[in-house]
Image (spheres, helix red, strand yellow):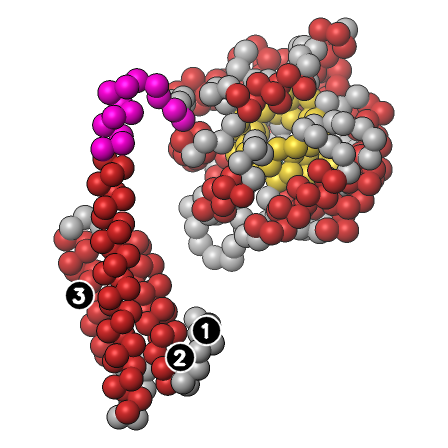
Amino acid sequence: MTDTLPDIQSVFDWMKSSSHPLLIAGPCSAETEEQVHETVDAIAKTKQVSLVRAGIWKPRTRPNTFEGVGEVGLKWLKDAGIKNNLPVATEVANAQHVEACLKAGIDVLWVGARTTGNPFSVQEIADALRGVDIPVIVKNPIHPDLQLWIGAIERIRDSGISKIAAMHRGFSFYGESVYRNEPRWEIPIALKTMLPELPVFCDPSHISGRPDLIQMVSQRALDLGMVGLMIETHRDPTSAWSDAKQQITPSTLNEIISALEIREEVCIDQEFIDQLQSLRRKIDGLDEEIIELIAKRMGIAKEIGEYKKDNGVTILQLERWTEIVKSRNFWGQSLGLSAEFLNRYLEQIHKESIRTQTKVMNQSNEDTEIPW
Ligand code: PEP
Ligand code: MN
């Protein structure tokens, strides 16, 4: 039976070269044998999914909630995978989990967001993996710390694992948001820039926290070049023992996947290439002008700093800053720029002006960072 399963090595090779996303689906948690089988059977029928997921040990934020069925669920998951000719994946958080998964023949492991944030745990997992080359997916840590994410990937890689992928599942925050975990897309983009060979997946379920955002988040992830998606899917989401609010049915999964636009990262049409090149030349010219203008602006800010220093005047004049924010927002927004962008831009410009003037005031050549 095992011989007929898709070879996960080739799945990973394909993942790097294919322009089609690799889809992972399955319940947040394995709950009962029947629930696992029924859900996996329905997912397999969509013929859209390459890897099945289910959580066996669940890291819950608060105690006294469902913490997973434990080792018994590994067999349910593996059997459901074999029955449907699909490889299976689960989350591991310590060495015992790794050992149990290897014994049960689980095909792919992932490190969850709470575990990635703890180097002791990641190292324990990495040590338990020494000598076995099973594919491992490393989710981002719950807080937006790129170095911690990269550190976990390095620990797994250094244990000899060659098939490593990352998974972007958003970042926790305190306050109101439409998302359960904010995507902060710039962070997975920075990861891809630093490690271009690393396949990066997206988990739109944990970013969204609700079904109606999953389509949009999935499309955005694909448009940013992510190789695949992991979508929590349950035969009956309303009765799920964990993450009931964000899970979808296999038929909704099918609809979402079918509606995704798959775009290519490259296009070999000569007319397109020429047109793109000519537009990019315009961008290059404009960037040069913008940088020259910003440098000129900073030169004047320095002059103002010297003038203020000679006259004993403070760096910050609140009234002037308020007026700048207001007028630039007015000009920029009337030209179609968003308030969010303008405010971020102005904040950075202002920060750099203050840094420049602080250097003048203190007659120092050192870069003095002013914390905000
Ligand atoms: C999960 O995938 O079920 C899970 C617990 O996710 P995360 O580690 O991203 O919170
Ligand atoms: Mn979940």
In contact (CB < 8 Å): disc 3 and disc 2: no
Disc 2 residue type (three-letter): Lys
Q: Position of residue 277 (x, y in %)?
A: 27, 31
- Name which of mark 3 and mark 2 comes first in the sequence: 3
Q: Which mark is residue 367?
A: 1
The three-letter code of the residue at mark 3 reads Ser
Say which amino acid is labelled 1: Asp
Report if residue 268 lies within the magenta region.
yes
Give the residue number, with chain letter if any, for mark 3. Answer: 327
Please indicate whether residue 314 sits to the left or right of residue 22 in the image.
Answer: left
Q: Secondary structure at mark 3?
A: helix
**Disc 1 versus disc 3: distance between alpha carbons?**
30 Å
Q: CA distance from mark 3 to mark 2?
A: 27 Å
Q: Pinpoint residue 319: horizontal percent, then vertical percent.
A: 23, 79
Residue 106 visible in the displayed image:
yes
| Span shown in magenta | 265-278
Quadrant in which residue 73 is drawn: top right
What residue is pinned by disc 2?
Answer: 359
Q: Are marks 2 and 1 in contact (CB under 8 Å)?
A: yes
Q: Earlier in the sequence, mark 1 or mark 3?
A: 3
Discs 1/3, front: 1
